[in-house]
């Protein structure tokens, strides 16, 4: 399956019969069969024709719209057949199931964040130590926390965890936090796009989450089931990318799919790193993409059977994330997803 990205202003996605066509300056860049397409992402200044939109809709392909910096603007709203809607609605009324699932997701997410912080050389960054202490505190409080309290704990950790990563990065690169913030937003949008595609494929209603609440735009179940994956698939990738690319200003052209000119545009570089990461074999001869799909399938099984949902837990080994002095070297893979037992 192929993801279609349009990053360069002036790019247009058209469709003829069952084929998507990516055009730029009246030149055909690429053709992709709709049945071989996983999802579509368009950045500010790019367009999708009515015919291409209809084709995407007919194949239930997620279409995401982002601004020039990779921040969320909107999406094509799709309705799944949702064959498991009855089970989802029943579980939504099962307070024990909802509480247990939310606890497991928050616990796994905090464990994963702790693993990432431990992989940093934090001796020169006291805020990392503060974040680790806060995570330990909230992990102890999870068993006694209500669902609203779990949301509050997660929001509080966000206010400590991300500033710690920003400060650590600044101390290692002297780069502005703005660049990594944009990458975090972009990575989160891309992760949720992949997650939405799997929910549509499996047949789950993305609006019926438990931990996250709908604001009219986000997809609560997508956020629930991808939260524990953000550490390795978004947070760590963004840190490594900034360490390897100290100048993230837009200094070239690209189209997100490659056109023989190389990846000059930083968005194209990050998207290439993102796609390469999803295709990386990590455990049991499965790629990250396959592991994520398996995880969402596990949630579907928990809806239909008397089993608990098991989020992805990242196993930490003492291989530190590369700093500016080693960023040019291939990063050691130190976090592997394994299910909580």
Image (spheres, helix red, strand yellow):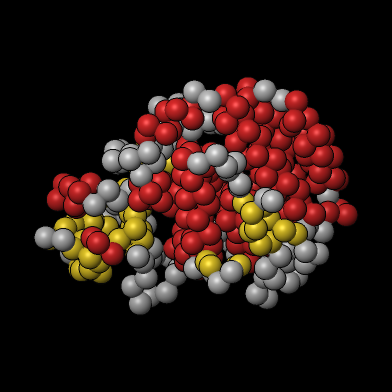
Instruction: Report the residue at 35% width, 51% height from top.
Output: 201
Asked whether residue 255 is in view, the answer is no
Q: Is residue 3 above or below residue 75?
A: below
Q: Residue 319 in the image: state x and y as whole percent.
A: 77, 67
Q: Quadrant of the N terminus?
A: bottom left
Asked whether residue 290 is in view, the answer is yes
Q: Residue furthest left?
A: 17
Which quadrant holds residue 155?
top right
Which quadrant holds residue 148?
top right
Q: Residue furthest right?
A: 123
Q: Residue 53 in the image: state x and y as whole percent.
A: 21, 48
Would residue 209 appear left or right of 162 to someone viewing this image? left
Instruction: Report the residue at 34% width, 64% height from top.
Output: 2
Q: Residue 49 in the image: state x and y as whole percent.
A: 18, 50
Instruction: Report the residue at 49% width, 61% height from top.
Output: 289
Would residue 208 appear left or right of 330 to someone viewing this image? left
- Of the pair 31 and 293, the residue shown nearer to us: 293
Q: Is residue 330 above or below residue 202?
A: below
- Of the pair 146 and 300, the residue shown nearer to us: 300
Which quadrant holds residue 316?
bottom right
Q: Residue 211 in the image: state x and y as whole percent.
A: 56, 31
Instruction: Report the residue at 64% width, 54% height from top.
Output: 339
């Amino acid at each position: 399956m192929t993801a279609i990205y349009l990053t360069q202003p002036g790019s247009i996605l058209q469709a003829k019969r069952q084929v998507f066509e990516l055009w730029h300056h009246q030149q055909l860049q690429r053709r992709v069969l709709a049945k071989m397409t996983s999802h579509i992402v368009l950045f500010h200044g790019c367009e999708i024709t009515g015919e291409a939109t209809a084709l995407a809709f007919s194949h239930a392909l997620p279409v995401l719209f982002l601004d020039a910096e990779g921040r969320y603007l909107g999406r094509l709203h799709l309705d799944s057949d949702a064959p498991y809607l009855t089970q989802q609605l029943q579980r939504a009324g099962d307070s024990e199931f909802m509480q247990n699932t939310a606890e497991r997701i928050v616990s796994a997410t905090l464990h994963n964040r702790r693993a990432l912080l431990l992989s940093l050389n934090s001796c020169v960054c006291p805020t990392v130590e503060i974040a680790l202490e806060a995570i330990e505190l909230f992990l102890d409080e999870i068993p006694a926390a209500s669902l609203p309290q779990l949301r509050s704990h997660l929001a509080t950790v966000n206010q400590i965890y991300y500033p710690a990563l920003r400060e650590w990065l600044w101390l290692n690169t002297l780069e502005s936090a703005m660049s990594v913030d944009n990458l975090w937003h972009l990575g989160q949008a891309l992760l949720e796009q992949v997650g939405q595609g799997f929910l549509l494929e499996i047949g789950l209603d993305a609006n019926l989450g438990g931990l996250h609440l709908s604001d009219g735009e986000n997809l609560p179940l997508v956020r629930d089931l991808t939260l524990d994956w953000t550490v390795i698939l978004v947070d760590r990738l963004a840190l490594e990318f900034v360490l390897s690319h100290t100048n993230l200003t837009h200094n070239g052209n690209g189209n997100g799919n490659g056109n023989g000119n190389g990846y000059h545009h930083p968005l194209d570089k990050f998207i290439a790193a993102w796609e390469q990461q999803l295709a990386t074999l990590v455990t049991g001869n499965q790629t990250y993409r396959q592991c994520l799909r398996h995880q969402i399938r596990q949630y579907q099984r928990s809806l239909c059977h008397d089993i608990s949902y098991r989020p992805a837990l990242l196993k930490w080994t003492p291989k530190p994330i590369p700093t500016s002095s080693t960023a040019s070297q291939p990063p050691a893979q130190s976090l592997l997803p394994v299910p909580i037992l």
